[in-house]
Image (cartoon, helix red, strand yellow):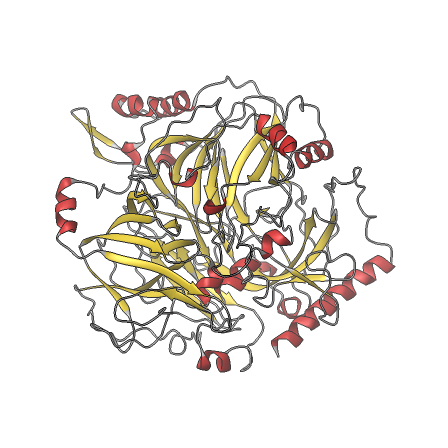
Amino acid sequence: MLHIAIIGIITAVLAVLVSSWNNGKNPPNPSNPPKPTPSHPTKPDHPTTPANPAPSIANSIINNPPLLEKGAKGKYELVAAYKTNKIYNPRSSEWDQLVVRGYLTKASLLNKQAARETGIVDELVGPQIRVKQGETLSVNLNNQLPDETPESCHHIEEQDINTPHCFNTTNLHTHGFWVSPQGNSDNIFVRIDPQKNFDYQYKIDPNHPAGTYWYHAHLHGSTAIQVSSGMAGPLIVEGNRVPKVKNGKVTETGDMDILWKDKAKNSYPNEKVLVFQQIQYDCKDASGADLNTNDCGTDGVGVIENYDGLAGFNTWGANNYYTSINGKILGEIQVNQNEFNRWRMIHAGVRDTLGLVIKELPNSQKFTAEQTLEACLNYQGRQNDQASIDEFNKLTSLPVHTIAQDGLTMNHVQIRRLSVFQPGYRHDAMVNFPTTNKYCIFDTRLNLDDEINSTPIPGQPGQIVPQLAPANPANAQLLGWVNVKASKLKEQTAAQFLKEQAQKIGLNKEIQNQLAQLNLSAFVGHSTLMTDAITALVNKRPKQRSVFDLTFGANAKFGYLIDNFDGIYSFGDDYNGPDATHGKYVRKLQIGQVDEWILTSNFATHPYHIHVNPFQIVEIRDPRRNDVSAAVPEDPNAPIDLDDIQYRGLKGQFKDTIFVKPGYEVIVRSHYKKFEGDFVQHCHILDHEDQGMMEYVRICGGEFDCNSPLPDHHGDNHSHH
């Protein structure tokens, strides 16, 4: 039984810990600042195994995730296994030991005995994978998770594929990649059993947009539990295309990367890759019995072995969990004063919204790490204490210059003081710290309807609420802090920086002038779909409608409302309506066409994600049918207006994930240029996806027959390598 194996791992880890405690080898508990503010120890102790010593990097510093190494045959060797490490717990001012599924940052760390008995000591974030345009990305995914049992996997699957199951069976999704969904490419119907491996090959188009993407597990039934454990990592497409200009007009677009690359060192020195993860662990003792939910103390180990917490509305906020950055909670980011950095930020969590804001701590130049954390934590305030909220709002918010969303360069830099991340979102931003004060990075409270799980439940008292209201007492929750080192760099604006970089590499003066106006149109990878000609075309075609819906209670169901089906249609349900495909509902899209989609939600809020092709946002209509997606210039001296703040400036932008609120209509367009085959669209609250809020999508009509048999999502795609 799977749970017996997990208890064995917990027992072994506790034995290692107890042995080290009894022998006096562990350093004493870190000193704490006066309550109620927790400390941030600089040298946490780690459990070790003889074959896998503890990581040498200090646990307080947020570094970029390690680059995954290629094997002898030029393949990236990505190993899925149980990992162990400590994570700081601000609720107890201690370190909690975790044993969770993850991707090893180095294949050489693999120790099969440790993987099964204690977990392999490694960082709690997946390694970084980078690929260039026109290359083939080869990844060997080696599943070293424990064996399944009939009770944990196949018996459940045979009864209902939308019941979470097969927690140790896996596969790989390249989120946002514009690649084929067939064969051994971005095929989420592939299954990789425990102790098996599979060779993926992703042929990257020479014109694939350079940008920030990510990879994560995507086997239906186990996606949420694996991603929330940390089975995710950054996936970067590097570009070197130079925009071309003729007669003062851009004839070919290029890649923003050329403005950031140090050619002499063949690297990107001013780049921060930041993966936000929400590891929602439960603490167990050596017998597997529950301890205090997320306070393991010295007697427990944090694990994620069921959906009790993941599928519970507001369990993240009710238990006051903290979001980690690259596996570190309340960690330190080091930067140089007046140096523009490119922050590649990835929301790799499962079901909670982030309202990211960076606040300057006044008169903090000489603060120690402990003093900085104490001050930042004090500014979290309380949601029912207006005085503390006023003090928080008085702090200067750092302007963040957003240059891309979901890996796709925007047509104009947008200056934001508050950036909203839903699960699956990515933001690339230019960030510059003008003083040597310390800065606090917060997840701040938004309006209720802009956060996940904020919809009232008809007929029930109270309402479903997001992670910061009202169960979480904080007005904002600290994510980390920034240590700014003094430098002799001159202060400059984002426009000056971009123009100067363009001058250094000899870009055309027209491009330089555009950048001086924060105009990025010379670096946008997709042609607009918002022309009169395309509007006339899509108006002649039926609209693609995607309507989220769910019900609660004993017969809870997650899925969509579709024509010719009574009730909610969940993934894989039988369907006998018009154009049924082998007894299932399949959304068929014609290769080469452009369609307009209307995305809505009948109940609750859902981040909509579709594989393969991104979409362009035409407009977002509120319940009064006002378009709330237009850009609204911010007054830096005015309070932040939270009304629909996450939608402002999205008009005309390309994305692959978008938040859909009840009563709203999100109007998007998508062009199916190439890459036929079967894939999915789904809610990126991943426990919703596992429970049926996912739909077959098929691009066909060229070489791919629109009536082809469906991929078998629960039987015929096991790997046997």
Q: Which residue: 29% across, 51% down? A: 205
Picture layout, residue 553 above or below residue 129: below
Q: Position of residue 527 (x, y in %)?
A: 23, 41
Q: Name the foreground residue: 26 vs 652.
A: 652
Nearer to us in this view, 137 or 645: 645
Which image quarter is the C terminus in?
A: bottom left
Instruction: Please name whichever residue, 338 or 691, is drawn nearer the observer in this view of the structure.
Output: 691
Query: Measured from the top left, where is residue 373 in percent x and y?
Result: 69, 35
Q: Is residue 283 visible?
A: yes
Q: Is residue 337 above or below residue 669?
A: above
Q: Position of residue 663 (x, y in %)?
A: 36, 50
Name the residue located 33 percent from the left edge and 59 percent from the top edge. 547
Can the viewer see residue 218? no
Q: Position of residue 395 (x, y in %)?
A: 59, 26
Picture quadrant where residue 334 is located? top right
Q: As drawn, is 366 to the left or to the right of 497? A: right
The answer to whether 145 is drawn above or below residue 522 in the figure is: below
The quarter holding residue 705 reads bottom left
- In the picture, measured across the screen, residue 12 lies left or right of residue 317, that is right
